[in-house]
Image (spheres, helix red, strand yellow):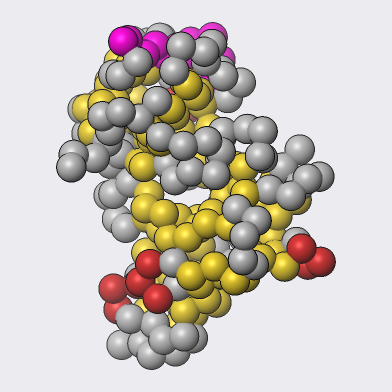
Amino acid sequence: GAGVSQSPSNKVTEKGKDVELRCDPISGHTALYWYRQSLGQGLEFLIYFQGNSAPDKSGLPSDRFSAERTGGSVSTLTIQRTQQEDSAVYLCASSSLGPSGEQYFGPGTRLTVT
Amino acid sequence: AQSVTQLGSHVSVSEGALVLLRCNYSSSVPPYLFWYVQYPNQGLQLLLKYTSAATLVKGINGFEAEFKKSETSFHLTKPSAHMSDAAEYFCAVSARSSYKLIFGSGTRLLVRP
């Protein structure tokens, strides 16, 4: 079946602009995660959605970052007033089990802020 | 707080040689442990996981890892490296009460012909 998809695959934006990154999880997966992968910081957890529960936003680096998940499926990560340090690969993952379950990752969106 | 340490940002082995990638974790309670592999320009793929069943865990592509509580380690091994194993490998931990993965800094495996 189809895996996790993300769009766009690459995004170049100017400093100060807003960007939206999209994630389509595997159908039926109730949990959705966003991670960021950068040279300086490695792989970092950003936010987690589980069903209708309030999301775990503990990893968001600043209030410029927000995410929503509509209808328990598609998720959008929004970065406002982008900064150069936001340049990274943003990875989305989904899973159907609890903490012991495999998280299935998408190919990521490479964001470059110029 | 949980953390993961991967010793060696780069490991180079000859094709056919043993692969050993080291991972040590810090956790106040027994965690779940994972190894993921990332090929260039791709997302992460699960190799194997430890969830408190057998301490020796077998994964895909001939990899295995052993959970050693006394050493707080979860090293990844493969008896014989193949050229296709060249990739970046990440060890990760999650608490039993948490869903987020805490990743190590990764180890890039190079396989020499």
Range of magenta residues: A60-71
The relative height of residue A2 versus residue B76 in the rendered view (above or below) is: above
Instruction: Work out whether residue A63 or residue A48 is closer to the camera in this orientation and state it.
Output: A48
Q: Does residue B81 appear left or right of residue B30 in this picture?
A: left
Q: Does residue B63 appear left or right of residue B112 in this picture?
A: right
**Is residue A17 something that shows in the picture?**
no
For the point 18% across and 39% down, the residue is A2
For the point 47% across and 79% down, the residue is B78
**Is residue A47 something that shows in the picture?**
yes
Magenta residue check for A62:
yes
Place of residue A109 in the rendered image (x, y in percent of width and height, measured from the top left):
29, 33
For the point 27% across and 49% down, the residue is B41
Place of residue B13 in the rendered image (x, y in percent of width and height, measured from the top left):
45, 83
Magenta residue check for B79:
no
The relative height of residue B107 versus residue A29 in the rendered view (above or below) is: below
Which quadrant of the rendered structure holds the C terminus of chain B? bottom left
Place of residue A88 in the rendered image (x, y in percent of width and height, measured from the top left):
40, 34
The outermost residue toward the left is A1
Residue B2 sits in which quadrant? Answer: top right
Total count of labels: 0
Q: Does residue A54 appear left or right of residue A103 in this picture?
A: right
The relative height of residue A26 versus residue B44 in the rendered view (above or below) is: above
Instruction: Work out whether residue A2 or residue A39 is closer to the camera in this orientation and state it.
Output: A2
Which quadrant of the rendered structure holds the N terminus of chain B? top right
Instruction: Work out whether residue B69 or residue B87 is closer to the camera in this orientation and state it.
Output: B69
Instruction: Work out whether residue A17 or residue A101 is closer to the camera in this orientation and state it.
Output: A101
For the point 29% across and 55% down, the residue is B40
Residue A25 sits in which quadrant? Answer: top left
